[in-house]
Image (spheres, helix red, strand yellow):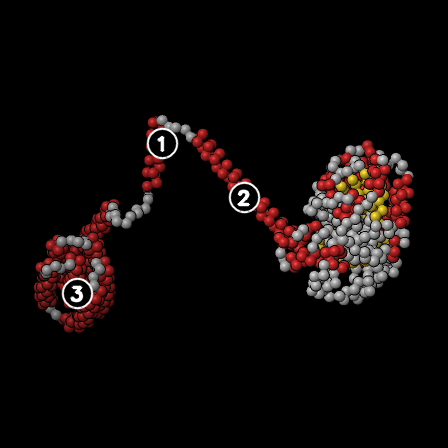
Amino acid sequence: MFNLFSLFKKDKIWDFKGGIHPPEMKLQSSRTPMRIAQLPDEVIIPIHQHLGVPGQLCVSVGEHVLKGQPLTRGVGRTLPVHASISGTVTAIEPFPSTHPSGLPEIAVRIQSDGKDEWREQFPLVDYQSQSKEVLLTRIHEAGIAGLGGAGFPTATKLKGGGNLIKTLIINAAECEPYITADDRLMQEHADEVIAGCQVLIHLLSPDEVLIGIEDNKPEAIESLKHALSTVPDEKRIFIRVIPTKYPSGGAKQLTKILTGKEVPSGGRSSDIGVLMQNVGTVVAIKRAIIDDEPLIERVVTVTGNGAKTPGNFWVRLGTPIYSLLKQAGFVAGSEQMVIMGGPLMGFTLPDLNAPVVKITNCLLIPSAEEMDTDNLEEACIRCGHCVDACPSGLLPQQLYWFSKGKEHEKAQQHNLFDCIECGACAFVCPSNIPLVQYYRQEKAEIREIDAEAKRAAEAKARFEAKKIRMEREKLEREARHQRAAVKLDDKDHGEVQSALSRVKAKQSIGKIISVKAGEEPDNAAAIAARKKRKEEVRAKQAAKLAQQKALETSSENVASKNEDADPRKAAVAAALARVKAKKAQQAQTEATTNETPVQNTEVEEVDPRKAAVAAALARVKAKKAQQAQTEATTNKAPAQNTEVEEVDPRKAAVAAAIARVKAKKEAQQTQSTVDETSEQHAKEEEVDPRKAAVAAAIARVKAKKETQQTQSTVDEAPEQHAKAEEVDPRKAAVAAAIARVKAKKEAQQTQSTVDEAPEQHAKGEEVDPRKAAVAAAIARVKAKKEAEQRRAKEEVTLD
């Protein structure tokens, strides 16, 4: 009784909610035997043909490859791709993808050599002797992915099942209209299907293997039963015929039909002990394990009213779609579309040069009557037909509004990702709303948001880890410093302090003096250096004066010795002596002028009495110097005049012209000296600019007058010399003596005037000491100028 109940349970099938019954349209291609597509001259093999990331290229341009040779290297969920023909790699470049967007993807272009030569193969007939790890590695290296349309890596799926799999389901329903690839594969290669099931039994050790097939494929059912009868020892494989209904081929729907169990929302079928594989994938597993053939070809259905000879083809992966369509009698029209997949779950290809890939199971070429493209999208009328047709028990109408309004959270709360995108809701929609397109777009946006959030979380985790690591390193560094610290005794401490003091002493040498606000700077060193420089200048000037006096004395001695010499030589010697005397006087005047501003800069707050005393001393020195020079000139004059008795008048005129030129130069130098002195005193002593301007103007007027007087005197000299050609020398001597006496009187009067000026300033109440010093210096300069002018007049008169 128990055995009968078990048999009845095994033969029982269940039903799922929803579903539709569209026109099947399978007889166009299912009645024609499979054909082998022509070998293409060139294949374009994309390196990304499965879910996950692409593998790493292991070939280069110009390299010769063999059929079945891997082009990429895959690790984990990354699957390799293989050369489907033998030939030469001509390019590795982006190429239009087999995708609704048509965006380019990296692909390997191989030019066929016409030999179609296999790489070295290692068949494994006795696979039962191998471990599961070896077989799973071989499946992975063969690049096998789900051929039902999902493209999930098969080896990864088998590893995820583990030992929890109780039921293995082979999906042979092929419920979508027009597609007959699995039907023809089971009809012609049923034995390989059974052999593949045995390989999976060895890997997974399930309790049962259920082959689910719809009742609209009677020839395939008979072929499978016949192949199963050839292995009588196999008692775990069962063929289950199910009613034709769309989408009975969905993983969750077929699991419910065959086992009565429902896959939980957001979960996988392995959670309830069920694992499902497509019938095409089973055949690929058998060939990879037993025949050592990687996945380089698959069965593709080419159908539709646009194909003259529809049918199923064994097609090499990488074959251009357009070349395959031509083998089915396709002629491109102006508005002809080509759909990859079925009419409900497929998509229109944007470029027919795209290659055949692992998930290409059908190429539909519909006519205008088959695909009614004139129906425009209209507003939803809330009829509810989509809810009745949904096989996953969702609310397509609400998902449509959430997807269109970008309400991602609400769409996820209504289990958007449980949608299998079967297209049943869009098929029954009277408003022609492409609901599946909205769902696909919403899923893509949610995945992108989740990926961005994941990247942000990873970045935050890395930042926190770095922060913790830096803090730990800081603590470790401080601990090392504490362990390395050594206490110094008194002797070591003293040595360290002495070394530091030596370093500071070295650094203080040549250090720039800095003055802080509110503190007085220490300028003692600078003042001492300045005084030293002044003393050196004075010493040099004194040495020059002594040298000049010695030269004058020697010239006088020479003149006295040569009294009876030639009068012309005597006149020349006298002229040289006068020039030297003038130079000495000018040097002394410049020294006095240079010393005056230096002294005045230092005398900022000097007592007016001290200023008067200093002025008096300066006057005494000037008197002495002037008297000594006057006496020397007076003593020289008689000797020179006695010698110049018979001077040629032409020479006298030349000498007078030279004297005029010299007088002009001296007057200009004196004028510039006076101007510079007045400007320097005005700037250094902060005198009122108006007063300084007035004083400078007065000085310039006086200098001009004196220059004019000197010029007139010099001009009169040649006339006097011309008249005095026949004058008695004794009378000339007397006239010279009288002129000297007058010059002395004028000099004394000028000196008394100069002396009275500082005294008057000293007596004045509250006189500024700086102004008094400036006035005294200007008076001294003027006195010297007048004395020089008188001496020049006397010399001209004597000449």
Return the x and y of residue 622 as percentages of the image width and height: 14, 57
| Residue 770 occupies quadrant | bottom left
Amino acid at the residue labelled 1: Val
Count the marks: 3
Determine the secondary structure under disc 1: helix
* Badge nearest the viewer, 1 or 3: 1
Q: Is residue 373 visible?
A: yes
Identify the residue at image location x=83%, y=54%: 179
Identify the residue at image location x=69%, y=58%: 397
**Looking at the image, is mark 1 or mark 2 earlier in the sequence?**
2
Q: Which residue is the site of mark 3?
A: 789
Identify the residue at image location x=83%, y=38%: 5
Q: Which residue is the site of mark 1?
A: 496
- Tell me: residue 563, above or below residue 647: above
Mark seen at residue 463: 2
Amino acid at the residue labelled 3: Gln
Amino acid at the residue labelled 2: Phe
Return the x and y of residue 54 as percentages of the image width and height: 71, 47
Q: Quadrant of the N terminus?
A: top right
Q: Seen in the image, is 523 located left or right of residue 221? A: left
* Badge nearest the viewer, 3 or 2: 2
**Looking at the image, is mark 1 or mark 3 earlier in the sequence?**
1
Identify the residue at image location x=62%, y=53%: 409
Separation of marks 1 and 2 at Cα, in angstroms:
44 Å
Asked if the residues shown at circle 1 and circle 3 are in contact, with their CB atoms under 8 angstroms apart, the answer is no
**In the image shown, does 753 or 658 lie closer to the viewer?**
753
